[in-house]
Image (cartoon, coloured by chain):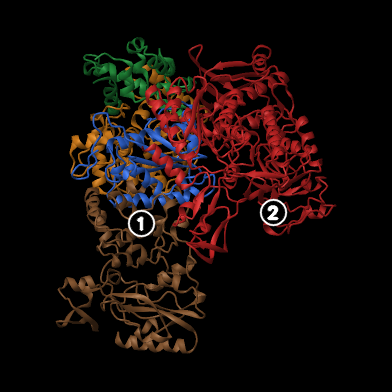
Amino acid sequence: MKYSYYPGCTLRTKAEILNRYALASAKALGIELEEVENWQCCGGMYTASTDEIATKLASVRALAQARDAGCDLVTLCSACFNVIKRVNEDARTNENFITKVNNYMAPDMEYHGETNVLHFLEVLRDVIGFDELKKKVVNPLTGRKIGAYYGCLLLRPGEVMQLDDPENPKVLEEFIRAIGATPVLYGQRNECCGGYQTLNEKSIAVQRSSAVVESALSQGAECLITACPLCRYNLAVNAAPQIPVYYFTELLAEALGVKEVAENGN
Amino acid sequence: MQLNDTNQAVPAESGAYKPLIVAFCCNWCSYAGADTAGSSRLSYPSNIKIIRVPCSCRVNPLFILRAFQRGADGVILCGCHPGDCHYTTGNYYARRRMTLLFSMLDYLGIERERTRVEWISAAEGAKFAATMNEFAETINRLGKNRKLRDLRCEI
Amino acid sequence: MAIDREMILQISGVNPKLCMKCGKCSGTCPAYDGMEYHPHQFVSMVENANLEPLLASESLYTCLSCMACIQRCPRQVEPAKLIEAVRLAVIRQQGCDHLLPDELPALLDPELPQQAIVTAFRKYKK
Amino acid sequence: MRDIREKLLKKIHELFDAGVVDRVVGWKAGEFCYDVTPALFNAGNIDEILYDAFCGPNQSKFLVKGAEGGEKKILALLKPCDTYSYNQLITEHRIDPEKIYALGIPCTGMVDINKIRALGISGILGIEEDGENLKIETLYGTESCKKADVLLERCLVCKGKNHVAGDELLIPDEEAPEVPKCAERMTEVEKLEAMSPEERFNWWRSQLSKCIRCNACRNACPACTCRTCVFDNPSSGVSAKVNTNDFEENMFHIIRAFHVAGRCTDCGECSRVCPQNIPLHLLNRKFIKDIDEFYGEYQAGAEPNVRGPLISYTEQDVEPSIVMTRG
Amino acid sequence: MQKIGVFVCWCGSNIAATVDVAAVAEALGKQPGVVYATDYQYMCSASGQNLIKDAIRDYGLTGVVICACSPRMHEATFRKTISSAGLNPYMLEIANIREQCSWIHKDREEATKKAITMGTAAIAKVQLNTPLTQMKSPVTKRALVIGGGIAGMQTALDIADAGFEVDIVEKKPTIGGKMAQLDKTFPTLDCSSCIVTPKMVDTAANEKITIFSYAEVENVTGFIGNFKATIKQKPRYVDAEKCTGCGLCTTKCPSKKSLNEFNMGLNTRTAIYIPFAQAVPLVATIDPDACIKLKTGKCGLCEKVCEAGAIDYAQKEELIEREYGAVVVATGYNQIKPVQYEEYLYNQSRDVVTSLEFERLMSASGPTAGHLQCPSTGKLPRHIVFIQCVGSRGTACREKPYCSKVCCMYTAKHAMLVKDHYPEVECTVFYIDVRTPGKNFDEFYRRAVEQYGVHYIKGMVGKVEQGDGCLKVQASDLLDNRQLHLEADMVVLAAAIEPDPSARKIGTMLTASMDTNDFFSEAHAKLRPVESPTAGVFLSGMCQGPKDIPETVSQASAAASKVIGVLSKDFLLSNPCIAHSDPTLCNGCSQCQNVCAYGAISYEDQMVVDKGVRETRRVAVVNEAICQGCGACTVTCPSGAMDLKGFASNQIMAEVDAICN
């Protein structure tokens, strides 16, 4: 199974470990992630206005490359997933937008939303299958009580993202079960961590991430997992009560027995 | 009215020209839908004239050709949604007949946008008005029907 | 160009007339307490062309873009898009960036992911 | 052909002698040998029945009137393609098979006199098959041409040597000679479809403007069996004896084709008899092509008593807007 | 040539404000055949009708054109008018210059011009009208009521009272419907069961009423006065004649895990069950999906304990054919399961319930015997939050676009009942609007606030979360302009109501039209609210739209009176606008027979004289009692032998010609 892969800038720097755990796990699962050439930053935030073109071009380039490679495009970072998937939806449905983009970029072959955008979690769920994943676990995380933190970007807007029920998602909980641990449901798992407000109005980020962690702790979570570097930062650094926060790929690598391989470089 | 050399439809001249559109509407759904549009004061061009028929299946291709002959620029047939025909199956037959007739007109080189079928229920006043506005817009753009018309009927 | 109601509607693509004033957006908003004007007020104030207070308000920059209000709005009003449009209208004006590169070093800490900076720039600066 | 005719005449005599039939619809030559029309024969003139490569005319329509009256059955001589029309007429109760004895006769393809003339052959006195070639006796001596070059349009796209109806076969279908298919049925329709609307319009105008409203197409068509045609009925509101303008030319042919849509077996009689050589069969074939594409393959007359495509439906039928969207 | 009178109605200012009615009358007066043309303020009024009658007499009119509102409105009125003046009622054509002209155009000149064209087309058509006579068809004096809730029962009782037979077909094992599940009713707070169970008993006891419970309508054919229905009687595996309803079997049945439908799945029942103590008919039913005997062949306990010997595992589905003169649809509603509203935790917390579930939790016959308890803990809740408009009034794909109408009132009732029994329990209601249009409704709501101290907060809940031993509710308070964070023990969702899913199939089989929400459409929103557009099919209760109990009962009785109107006639006059075939033109090809949905066309050998020749021909004959006048046959007929009276080909072409002139 081969996929085009869009790591995104944070996975090249501060969240490199998210990337490395994912690549090692993918390899162990027989998934080939081929990095899109010369990808550019997605911008981190989808601009929800009718008249912005420039902020979406990088995503279209990556999408068009995946189309040309004949592969689905896989992302790991929730923000990249959100931006690229929504831009792809624009390319599919907003004729005015995509005409302008194609005129501007003048690619060899016009792009019209042909590429399928997947989050790595969807590959695990829909391609590998959690039952199959469970069979490949060599080091089950039995007894660990883990809270899944979805945040906003994986799920919303639900009509576009189509990853899961935006109000009662299950994919991360199923993932946690597959690696042998016990999922902990808590109310704030799909509420915002404060995001980039950590730069503008830190008090909001502190209030939000604390609320998330408190909610998780109240339901008995021992640690949290997330797919987003910014969520991880807010929950780990800005939240008042402390709780360990991991990338979901770290626990995946651990369960598959490839954690050391990942940490020591592939 | 003069036919130009190539039988090309001439686009409307600066607003003076108003295309004539005949709408055949089934009594139970679409004619009632037109009434609903009226009760809701939803406007559509006055050059659309409605002919009430009991069912879309009452509309003979002869009527449609007759309308074009006498100078209609567009003909639209409206009936109940498939499955909702007051007479159970009438619109299914109408659907096949009109599909084949429209295809034949297209085959003869007559602008295919001049004919249309829409399913509009009694409740869909808004759809009725929107459909008529859109169809009028289309016919306006196509201009006068030159290809399928009896020039003796011109005054 | 002066910022007016039409401009906001055009940038956002939102039709505030769809709103039935249920307040679910404000019942949902996780940044509510940090805002002077709340999501339902944005919808109402834009519809009433009462823009001055909004343009001057910090609330423009407080929205988390978490899209919870978009997700839960029963009438597909998409308040967050409206807030974003007001903000874009402001920062697109000359000299109205809300975040300047000079301010950045003081805000950084070693753990902060790039994503935060990129996103903040996209949000606050033109 | 000559031996088939001999065999046929012998069979006809047998059927008369056995008292099965008392009259027969056969082919007779007109002023010229190629001017062949169906005609009624009785015991006295059986031997005048022709059967050669000019016997293209589809006889089945003749049975609508011919089967009425008479004490015994009427004998019908049906080429394979004629049996499709025969079935269709049974389906529509236009003929009663109880009153007819249908004899299936083999056919190796009928020729189009216009195509022979186009080869520069004139003064034709007779025709004889010679393998893949035709020997043509003329006032000026014997000429020869390839049969495939002069076949009727219908025979170029022959439906095959099998009869789909009938009481008896002159020779079993398996033993009959194969009839090569020389063309794809929809090629000409597709060519027209590929044109721009303007080109199509102009092409059809150039054809239909030739129409002199002689009604030959209608009179020859085995599906046009109305006792009174709408175009002849003053109370129909559309009756007319002549085309007075473009519109009426179009109208007549659209309605004629529409009235036989789903019933037309594609026998091609309309084009064969058209004195102006308008390819009218291309209208019928367009309907056939659309029916096949939209509602599934359908051959009118392939079997009797089935519901045609315009008197049936499915809930999932395509919408008329397909005409706009299919490109 | 007809002598035509043209009558242009002003409809007060409805037409006259936009259309120059005098100009229309003047222009139409010059049309060939028109001998009289006038305009008048209200043509449908008594004096307007007299004007028409006088003109018919004074001018010897043979045809009448009325330019007024839609023929769907007053065609019948004006037919009667001209008929009373001695003219055949079908010598009338109406030009719809209100709905299709004055109401949709603003420009006076344009609208006047269009009205003239429409009038001209009507004149052209009426020129070709011929007098038509209605046919008589007999009426089967029995009604079918589909659905045995309060609507169906009331309709059946009223019809039976008038002396006609009625069959009720109810898909559940008992009649009674939703009302039997309710605890109290607003705004009187009287006990729902106490008023509905006597109705159930009356219904069962009425000798004119036959109840087919646990049965479904499979198919309906025919037309007003002459419907034929196939009823599918599902097997109960219990002989309803023998079963005494003692309930012994239900105490012995070892399969106890099926969700109890009557209690909205809040508790369980046995595989053999009686839905509730007052069920009618009071007989047991075996749920084949749960019964061990039916699934594995082993068990048979119920058969052993049944003293009446009523158990019959071999019972089979039965198809029953019945004939009816009229059909009433009373298929009712359901409350949506708010599974798509997970911000309210419906799937994730047992303490989040719908209002119908709450109704069962409050009911003395419910799973808690009327004691209010949190489903998760069994404890009395300290604070209950009620959320209004869940799934109603929205445009997103999970939402219904309409107001469910009854929620405001039943929520006030719920809060009031809670406060009445447990004054210490806090009740908070989040509302968008409080809608109380009804007699004593607003007073009732005000009592909840003023006397019972129910908190009403204008705002909406954004999210409900599982907290530590409670539910955390985050909501907006729009009037205080603040966000609230409340703790509650129960959340009650006023989830939208929707038509019962069986309605769509029934609508299709009856060819009764439905709106986009699957509510049945009425023949006229104002004037014919209990009739479906299909003749002989009537609407009762929620199947037509959200309504409360008194409205339902009113509609049920109204539908019954309409049915009685049909059944009390010995014959019905049928629509004379039907197909007929000209034997001289008919080819006998049978194509028309194939497209007729009613089987109204047959073929006969007839002696025909055509062009001086006499011969026997096979020709089409239309059964005038069966033909509904759709016209499918007319287009199928290539020779034009088949035509439609009232919508004849030459009439339609005359209209086309007039419009395109």
Find residue B75 and report its horizontal and vertical position in percent: 37, 41
Observer-nearest residue: B77 or B13? Answer: B13
Location of mark 1 (residue)? D290
Find residue D200 and report its horizontal and vertical position in percent: 24, 52
- Disc 2 marks a residue whose amino acid type is Glu
* Quadrant position of the C terminus of chain E in the picture: top left
Find residue E377 and report its horizontal and vertical position in percent: 65, 30
- Disc 1 marks a residue whose amino acid type is Asp
| Chain assignment, label 1 | D
Disc 1 to disc 2, how far (Cα)? 42 Å
For mark 2, give the secondary structure. strand
Q: What colour denotes chain E?
A: red
Q: Is residue D144 above or below residue E584?
A: below
Quadrant of residue D129 within the rendered picture: bottom left
User: Which chain is drawn using blue?
Assistant: B
Find residue E356 and report its horizontal and vertical position in percent: 64, 31
| Chain assignment, label 2 | E
Q: Evaluate whether label 1 is on the same chain as label 2.
A: no
Q: Is residue A192 above or below residue B75?
A: above
Location of mark 2 (residue)? E321
Quadrant of residue E117 within the rendered picture: top left
